[in-house]
Amino acid sequence: MSAKYTILEEYIRPVVEGLGFTFWGMEYLSQGKDSVLRIFIDTDEEKGIDVEDCARVSRQVSSILDVEDPITGEYNLEVSSPGMDRPLFNLDQYQAYINAVVSLRLRVPFDGRRKFKGQLMGIENEDIVIRVDQEEYLLPIELIEKANVVPQF
């Protein structure tokens, strides 16, 4: 986890949780004037996350970030639910989706490839075990750039 992510999370998580939501995770995509800070929130309530929930969190987080100013330059703030193809950010989230189909993209190639899509078999220490076709891979979580649950219908 980068230092920037850690600093942003220190400001954002308490705001999200203070409003009664679960801080699922976030992505910061630094692209000059088109930079995006995407925050994912969740809830245990049956109704799920709606547009007004996202707007409330957006207003509160925006206020904190305007005061603390941890991001230099312009950026767009987006707040959404994780959705059905929810991103996975930490080991607890991976643990909750064992046996689900996941799609992973690595920061650097592993065994000659960066993309993996298969069944999440488990976790060993800080590594993710994924079965692709009939082969299992042990992938260190710190190598995972992006991971999503693949919805099964």
Image (cartoon, grey):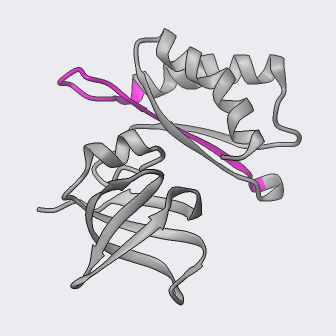
- Residue lying farthest top? 18
Report the span colored magenta: 34-52
Q: Residue 48's spot in the image, x, y percent?
A: 26, 29
In the rendered view, does 120 fall on the left or right side of 112?
left
Q: Residue 28's spot in the image, x, y percent?
A: 67, 48
Q: Residue 87's spot in the image, x, y percent?
A: 42, 51
In the rendered view, does 75 fall on the left or right side of 106?
right
Q: Quadrant of the C terminus?
A: bottom left
Q: Assess whether residue 94 is covered by the magenta stretch.
A: no
In the rendered view, does 35 fall on the left or right side of 109?
right
Find residue 52 and report its image quarter: top left
Up the image or down, 104 lies above or below 60; here it is below
In the rendered view, does 89 fall on the left or right side of 76?
left
Q: Residue 148's spot in the image, x, y percent?
A: 38, 58
- Residue lying farthest front? 125
Find residue 37 and report its image quarter: top right
Residue at image coords 40%, 60%: 128
Up the image or down, 123 lies above or below 113; here it is above
Up the image or down, 85 lies above or below 44; here it is below
- Residue lying farthest left? 153
Q: Assess whether residue 49 is covered by the magenta stretch.
A: yes
Residue at image coords 56%, 41%: 26
In front: 74, or 146? 146
In front: 111, or 7? 111
